[in-house]
Image (cartoon, rainbow, N blue to C red):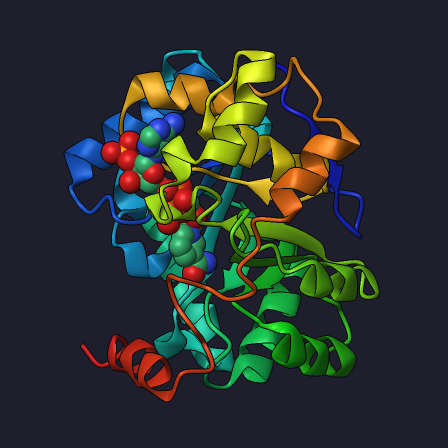
Amino acid sequence: MNIGNVTLSNGVKMPLEGFGVFQVPDPAVCRQAVLDAIETGYRLIDTAAIYMNEAAVGEAIKEAIAKGVVKREELFITTKLWCNAASYDGAKKAFADSMNNLGLDYLDLYLIHQPFGDVYGAWRAMEELYQAGKIRAIGVSNFYIGRFTEFAEIVDLKPMVNQIELHPFYSQYDAIENMKQYGTVPQAWGPLAEGKHGIFTHPVLSAVGAKYGKTAAQIALKWNIQRGVSVMPKSIHKDRMEQNIALWDFTLTDDDMKSIDALDLGHSEIIDHNDPNVVRYILGATKE
Ligand SMILES: NC(=O)c1ccc[n+]([C@@H]2O[C@H](COP(=O)([O-])OP(=O)(O)OC[C@H]3O[C@@H](n4cnc5c(N)ncnc54)[C@H](OP(=O)(O)O)[C@@H]3O)[C@@H](O)[C@H]2O)c1
C-alpha cells in the first residue's frame, strides 16, 4: 500500500492517511486495533493524552516492530497535550508522561489539543523539545480560524499542522486557505463525520463511489486527501481499516469534487468551540 505524503514546513514528510484511536478506551481493543492497522499498512497513528490509551498504542507499536512488520522510523506517531497541561511546565511534564506511556524516545508530531489555557507557555516548551530533537514536528488542534490566526501571528515557530474537524458536511475551505499563509498543513479529525449525517449511505457520496467501485466512506476520505488534507479515520474493524486505506488507485474528477463540496453545511454537527457550554465542558474534563 503506497500512502501519499505531505511535506511539512520543516521538510518532514507526514502520511496523508493515518489511523485514529479516539473513543477506544479498552487497552486490549486499542492494542489489537493499532496492531491490525499497522499490519494493514497504516503508518500514522493518532492518539492523545486524554484518550487514555497511549500505553496500549505503545504496546502495539512495540509488538509490530518486534514482529518485523515495520521499523520505528517508518511510523509517524502523534499525541496531544490536554488543557490541564497547557503551560510551560505542564507541557514539559505532559510530554515526558506521554513518552513514558508510549515507550518512545522521540515523537513525530505533538499537538496542543485545544485552544484553551496558557497555550503560549506550552508552545515555548514544545519549541524547546522540538529544537532538542525530541519531537519532529509541532502543531495545534481545534484552533478555529480566528484563534489560529492570532496564535500563528504571535508565535515564532509557526504550527506545522492544525488538526480540525474536516469532512464533506463541514469543509472549512476558508480555514484551510488561511492555514496556507503560515505554512500549516490541515489535518482532519472526524473525516467520516463520526458516522453522522448518514455519511455511509449518503446518496451523493454513494453515487460518486459507484463510478469507481468505492464506498461512500472511501469517497469522503479521498475528497479530503485530494484537497491536501491529511485524514486518520478510526475503526476497530479490520475489514473497515482495509476499506478505508484502499484509496490510492483512483482519482476524483473536478466535477466529483464539486458535487462533494456542495454537501457543506457550514457548521459542525459534532462540536462548536465557540459555544460557552462546550468550552466549560472541555475545561471541566481537565479537573480530575
Ligand atoms: N483533535 C481532536 O479534537 C479530535 C477529535 C476527534 C477525533 N480526533 C482524531 O481523529 C480520529 C478520527 O475521528 P473519529 O474517530 O472521531 O471519527 P471518524 O473517523 O470520522 O469516524 C469513526 C466512526 O466511523 C465508523 N467507521 C469507520 N470506518 C467505517 C466504514 N468504512 N464504514 C462504516 N463505518 C465506519 C467507526 O466505527 P467502528 O470503529 O465500529 O468501525 C466509528 O464509529 C480519531 O480517532 C482521533 O484520532 C481528534
Residue 35 falls in image quadrant? top left
Residue 39: give x, y in percent of width and height. 41, 15
Observer able to see residue 47: no
Identity of the residue furthest to the right in this view: 181
Q: Is residue 23 left or right of residue 118?
A: left
Label total for image: 0
Q: What quarter of the picture does the N terminus occupy?
A: top right
Q: Nearer the viewer, residue 271 or 18?
A: 271
> Residue 126's x, y, as percent?
59, 67
Q: Is residue 90 above or below residue 182?
A: below
Q: Quadrant of ligand 1?
A: top left
Indicate whether 25 appears above or below 118: above
**As rendered, which of 65 and 215 lies closer to the eye?**
215
Q: Residue at x 54, y 34 (%)?
A: 221
Q: Is residue 172 visible?
A: yes
Occupied quadrant, residue 139: bottom right
Image coords of residue 101 (percent x, y)? 31, 49
Looking at this view, is 45 or 238 the one in front? 238
Q: Relative to the observer, which residue lies in front, 102 or 230?
A: 230
- Residue at x-position 35% and y-position 22%: 240
Q: Residue at x 39, y 69 (%)?
A: 82
Quadrant where the C terminus is found in the figure: bottom left
